[in-house]
Image (cartoon, rainbow, N blue to C red):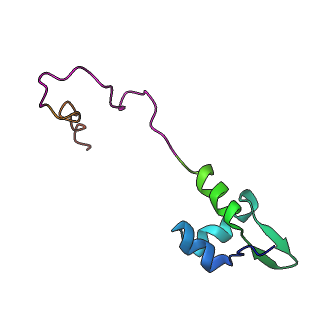
Amino acid sequence: MSRRLYTYPEAAEALRVSERWLRRNINDLPHSRKGRAVTFTDDDLDRIDAMFHHEPTAGPLAVVPSAPSSPAAHPLAALKPLPARR
């Protein structure tokens, strides 16, 4: 059984996060620890990615599809910018 084991720097690069972030959050993330050696498998990286995956919900800022005013109208044409912040 040959599976890829990632070190902190390799896992951070694969997840596109800083190594520091991984180390600070290690107690909440899936990983393997053998003494002081911490490793991550491909499954661990997939689970970490899934933990922080976000899908938009039907809240006040969500895009609600409506019938286009014309067949050539772009689906995002109804989006309005947020008001300026002070």
- Work out which quarter of the rendered image holds the C terminus and state it: top left
Residue with the most extreme right position:
35
Asked if residue 59 is positioned above or below residue 32 in the image, the reply reads above
Q: Residue at x 67, y 71 (%)?
A: 23
Q: Position of residue 24 (x, y in %)?
A: 66, 67
Q: Residue at x 20, y 30 (%)?
A: 78
Q: Quadrant of residue 29?
A: bottom right
Q: Residue at x 71, y 70 (%)?
A: 40
Residue with the most extreme front position:
1
Asked if residue 17 is positioned above or below residue 66 in the image, the reply reads below
Count of labels in the image: 0
Q: Residue at x 62, y 72 (%)?
A: 11
Q: Indicate left or right for 17 with 1 as reference.
A: left
Q: Quadrant of residue 15?
A: bottom right
Nearest the camera: 56 or 84? 56
Q: Position of residue 80 (x, y in %)?
A: 21, 34
Q: Position of residue 35 (x, y in %)?
A: 88, 78
Asked if residue 6 is positioned above or below residue 83 in the image, the reply reads below
Q: Indicate left or right for 18 with 26 as reference.
A: left
In magenta, the rendered stretch is 54-72
Nearest the camera: 7 or 23? 7
- Work out which quarter of the rendered image holds the N terminus and state it: bottom right
The question of residue 66 being in magenta is answered with yes
